[in-house]
Image (cartoon, rainbow, N blue to C red):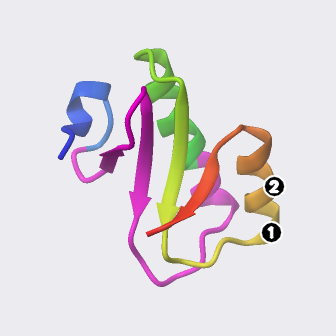
Amino acid sequence: MIDPRDFELHPKTVLEDLGRKHFAIVLDRKSRIIMSDGRKIQDKAEKLMEKGLKKISLKTNAPVCSKTEKFLSDLKIRILPI
């Protein structure tokens, strides 16, 4: 696993390397992902991009509200299933 502290992220953040400077932020939970979560994901993605990563995705098994889905899509953050 990747140590999130290398990217100045909270130690409980789960990251997955998808290759070619493409990382995924993994959220394994049952509750819906809403806009407040989307803003936190945006902050994490910005920190990862500052370190030279090209693509960021979100891997989750939770439902994502449509507003948050559009917000992340506008930021070029893909949502992938776990």
Say which of 16 and 70 sits in front: 16
Which labelled disc corresponds to residue 30? none
* Secondary structure state at the residue bearing disc 1: helix
Question: Mark 2 packing: few (<14 Cα in 10 Å), some, or many (20+)?
Answer: some
Asked if residue 47 is among those painted magenta in the image, a careful observer would answer no
Say which of 17 and 29 sits in front: 17
Which image quarter: residue 74?
A: top right
Name of the residue lying farthest toward the bottom: 30
Tell me residue 44's x, y (percent): 47, 38
Q: Is residue 35 above or below residue 63?
A: above
Query: Which stretch appears magenta?
Result: 11-39
Q: Is residue 78 above or below residue 75?
A: below
Whether the residues at callouts 1 and 2 have beta carbons within 8 Å, the answer is yes
Which labelled disc corresponds to residue 70? 2
Q: Quadrant of the C terminus?
A: bottom left
Question: Mark 1 packing: few (<14 Cα in 10 Å), some, or many (20+)?
Answer: few
Which image quarter: residue 66?
A: bottom right
The structure residue drawn at horizontal position 22% and vertical position 45%, both measured from the top left corner, is 11
Look at mark 1 in the image and give the residue it sits on.
66
Question: Residue 59 vs residue 9: left or right?
Answer: right
The structure residue drawn at horizontal position 66% and vertical position 67%, both measured from the top left corner, is 34
Q: Given the image, on which type of amino acid does mark 2 rest?
A: Lys
Label count reads 2
Tell me residue 41's x, y (percent): 54, 47
Q: Is residue 33 above or below residue 4?
A: below
* Secondary structure state at the residue bearing disc 2: helix
Q: CA distance from mark 1 to mark 2?
A: 6 Å
Name of the residue lying farthest toward the front: 20
Asked if residue 14 is among those painted magenta in the image, a careful observer would answer yes
Question: Residue 39 vs residue 15: left or right?
Answer: right
Q: Given the image, on which type of amino acid does mark 1 rest?
A: Ser
Tell me residue 16's x, y (percent): 32, 48
